[in-house]
Image (cartoon, helix red, strand yellow):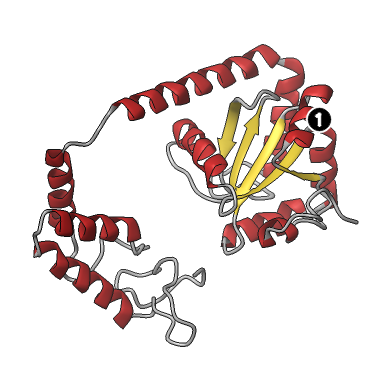
Amino acid sequence: MTNHLNKEISPYLLQHAHNPVDWFPWGDEALKKAAAEDKPIFLSIGYAACHWCHVMAHESFEDEETAKFMNEHFINIKVDREERPDIDGIYMQAVIAMTGSGGWPMSVFLTPDLKPFYAGTYFPPVRRFNMPAFKDVLSGLANAWKNDRNEVEKTGVQVGAHLQTQAKNQSGDSLTPEHLVAIANAMQESYDWGYGGWGDAPKFPQAMVLEFLLHHSVVRKNDEFLKLIKHCLQAMARGGMYDVVGGGFARYSTDNLWRVPHFEK
C-alpha cells in the first residue's frame, strides 16, 4: 500500500510513501481537499538524517490505529525541509512563537486556510518526559475542531497576525555597520577558548557564525577573527566530529570536547 508520496523525488518523502498515513505532498491537491472536506491540516516537516523524525515515524506514522485516526480527522501533509526551506522557515517561526523553541520533526496543525493553531516537534506515542501522547494531541485537536471551532480559528488568526507583524518588523530593519561590529564582538567575547565553539553540550558547529565572522574579517580588513575561526575548526577536526573516512562533519557533538559525534552528518 502506498500513499500520495510514492511519486515524489525526495528521499525523505519516499521513506514515508508506504506509511498507512494517507500523506500528501505540499500542493494544491492537499490544500483543496482540506477546504472541500472542511478538515484541519496536520503538517509534518522533517529531513532524511533527522533521528527523531524516524523515531516518530516508527512509533506513530507506521501505527495502523494512529494512522486511521489521522486519515479520518485530518489532511496529512509531509514536507522535506531540505526540499522546501521556504515552508519550513514560515512554520518554524510559528512553532517558536507558540512553544518557545523549535526543532524537527516539526508538527504543526493548520486551519484549511493555513493558519497554525497548535504546534510542537516530536510527540511520543504515550505520555512521557512531560510531553503529551501524540494520540491524545490528535484526539484533543479533532474534538476542538468539531466542538470549539471559534476558539481554534481565533488562535489561528492571532498566530497569523503575530507572524505577519514579525515579518514586517524584520523587513523594515536594516543592520548598520555598527550592528555588525557589535555582533562580531559579542561572538568573540562568548567564544569558548578552552574547547572551541559556543555554549555547552550538545555543541553545534555553528557554521553560520563562522561564515559571518569570516566575511566580517574580510570586509573590515581585520584578521583578529581568523584566529578564532581556525581554533574552532581545528578543535572540531581533532575530535570525533570529523569523519576521517567519508569526510565532512557530524551535525553536532554530544559532549563538550567535540569527541562524541551524533550520527547525523
Q: Nearer the viewer, residue 93 or 62?
A: 93
As displayed, is residue 183 above or below residue 160? Answer: below
Q: Residues within 10 Å of mark 1 (few under 14, many from 20)?
A: some
For residue 43, which quarter of the picture?
A: top right
Residue 30 point in image, percent of width and height = 77, 35
The residue drawn where x is 35% and y is 70% is: 255
Residue placed most toward the observer, 44 or 220 = 220
**Foreground residue among 247 and 72:** 247
Which image quarter: residue 134? top right
Residue at image point 79% right, 35% down: 29
Residue 185 lies left or right of residue 80; in this view the side is left
Q: Left of 100 or right of it: where is 6?
A: right
Q: Quadrant of the rendered structure where residue 144 is?
A: top right
Is 203 or 29 nearer to us in this picture? 29
Q: Give the percent coordinates (x, y) of residue 226.
A: 15, 67
Callout count: 1
Q: Residue furthest bottom?
A: 245
Asked whether the viewer can see residue 161, the reply is: yes
> Residue at 72% of width from left, 28% of height from top?
40
Q: Using the image, determine if residue 224 lies above or below residue 24.
A: below
Q: Amino acid at mark 1?
A: Lys
- Outermost right residue: 1
Quadrant of the rendering where the N terminus is positioned: bottom right
Where is residue 76? Give x, y as percent. Answer: 75, 40
Q: Position of residue 181 (x, y in %)?
A: 13, 46
Q: Secondary structure at mark 1?
A: helix
Q: Residue drawn 64% across and 50% down? A: 124
Q: Which residue is mark 1?
A: 33
One can see residue 193 in this view = no
